[in-house]
Amino acid sequence: MRETHGQEADGDAVCRAPAGSYLRCSRAGGCLALLLVITITTGAAPGSQPLGPQIAAPQEPITPVPPSPPADPLKLALGEQLFVDPRLSHDGTLNCSSCHDLHSNGADSKRVRTARDGSVMTFNIPTVFNAALSFRLNWEGNFRTLEEHAESSLENPANLATNAEEVLKKLDADPEVVRQFTQAYGRPPDRTSLLDAIATYERSLLTPGSRFDRWLDGDAAALSVEEENGYQLFKSLGCISCHQGVNIGGNLFERHGIFHPLASPKPEILRVPSLRNVATTPPYFHDGSAPTLRTAVRKMALAQLDQTLSDQQIEAIVAFLNTLTGTYRGVPVAAAPP
Amino acid sequence: MKVTPAAAAVSVLLVLLTWLAFRAIDTDAERYDRALKALDRFAMLEIALHRDVLSARAGLLRNYDPLVEEINALRASLGRLRDNASGDGEEAAAIARFAAAAARQEELTEQFKSNNALLQNSLADFRLFSAQLSGSGESSPQAPAVSALAAAMLQLTLDTSPAAASEVADRLNRLAAQPFPSGDAEAGLALLAHGGLLHDLLPTTDGVLRALLAAPSKGELKALRTMILTRQTASRTTAREFRVLLYATSLALVGVLVHLGLRLRARAFALQRRAAFEM
């Protein structure tokens, strides 16, 4: 499926109770006891049957997208401005939004882009929405922070083909930008503040409010029967083993083509992509080889699970995946125009 | 300007007292406290990580976000430890060894997550296909072989010893040797594929888990803590010794002051008597 970026959380959060998504006890024995109590009182294994969202949701392996983290509004505004600033490319023709269209799905609709030198880029463009919720960035998971990734995109000859120094020279020549940086950071633009402003803005690009998140929050009417069945199928088939957590993926590496070839064989190991907003981000896979969600589900089931799904099963899972579309600034995320 | 011996003595005394006062302060106390706090935090996070990987293996922890948070927090603790380091070679080397052990732990955790995801995935599918084949009719010639394989696999989930793995391999071979009816062929092949994967994955995953739980970071953490505690104790002892010296110097000064005061008083009395006599 299509990838989203990720970011390292600098966490002291380990001892916090997670947002009610899984059993978490101080001792395994305690968990086992709790599991037994739940099994006895409900007559079913936790998570195996819909018990009504108010009861089932707290035990789900997926947690809702949180609201955007609090941030300095001056830095946010600066980051938003930089995101669409063509001075971030060497020849002034590209900016971050050239590949990550925030008016649609945070990516684009192309299978793979053509690089500046005319060569075809290796990977399908990932969406920037919810990138901050993943643990690593890019299909290969080769960046831990949004700052690292932003700098790499600046320097990549196939992308923005510039560097922080060149961008800073251009920004320094603009008194208004210098004033904005001084207001936000207490100093004129430098490499750290430039990357921080972009990363701060990207951290705000979360898309809460999907129908599935509303269901997780207890709104039983948010999902239809078919969609809920699709979710149960998604779990029972084993898709949930990789696509779990707040970003429904994006928190581990995995081999692809376990049982059958999936897409381009290289690289063999990928960061598991997030399924947030997946219905709006065709084409799918790291090489963009699956044009539709149905194709992607069918191929994934065969390649990763050795399962040949029926059309009905595919429809049910796609119905569930359609419920994962969230909103950005109150507007539902939409597919990019072809 | 001529410096009198008294002024020189006062200057020397001032320098001495200031030097003693500075040496009597345990200036590294906060640094050592911060380092020990970072190590304590690291140890606590490591326990949480180990608990969560075990929970994930048992299927009780159903997403990997807590593991990600713990690894990130471990890295943050390590970063604090590095920032706090004094910069001397021995401490830097100990932190580097500790960081290498922590990196190995992270690597094993990532390996565990990837393996365990496949494992949980294949267990779900193995259950699905074995139920499908077992339920396809009591007259199915494969039903006993499927049940025997399922029993052997159940044992392997509990005990990943070579004997249990060998039993599963044997059951898989026996089942593979039987032709499946055309209606069950696809499910049969999928069961064999998932069974084969589980046969490899269950021992591998437990091996990773054992390596993770036995990761050398505990030893490195203990060594680093011992080194910091030793230095903290030495620093405290030195500061205490200088405080004693400072106290002794102060007492000596008080003695000198009393002595000077008495002499001054005696001279004042002498002057008074002389003045009274001359009047």
Image (tube, rainbow, N blue to C red):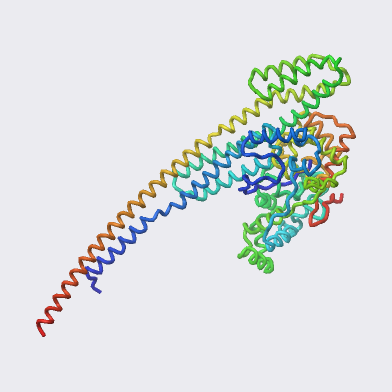
Answer left or right for A314 relative to B113. Answer: right
Instruction: Quadrant for residue A249, please give it.
Output: top right
Nearer the observer, A130 or A106: A130
Answer left or right for B279 relative to B73. Answer: left
Q: Is residue A147 above or below residue B113?
A: below
Q: Is residue A73 visible?
A: yes
Residue lying at 48% horizontally and 38% vertically, measured from the top left: B222
Nearer the observer, A222 or A333: A222
Nearer the observer, A228 or A206: A228
Residue A301 lies, in percent from the top left, at 81, 33
Nearer the observer, B105 or A169: B105
The number of numbered discs placed on residues in the rendered structure image is: 0
What is the quadrant of the C terminus of chain B in the image? bottom left
Residue A183 lies, in percent from the top left, at 65, 67
Q: Residue furthest left?
A: B277
Answer left or right for B35 relative to B110. Answer: left
Q: Is residue A281 visible?
A: no
Q: Residue furthest front?
A: A41
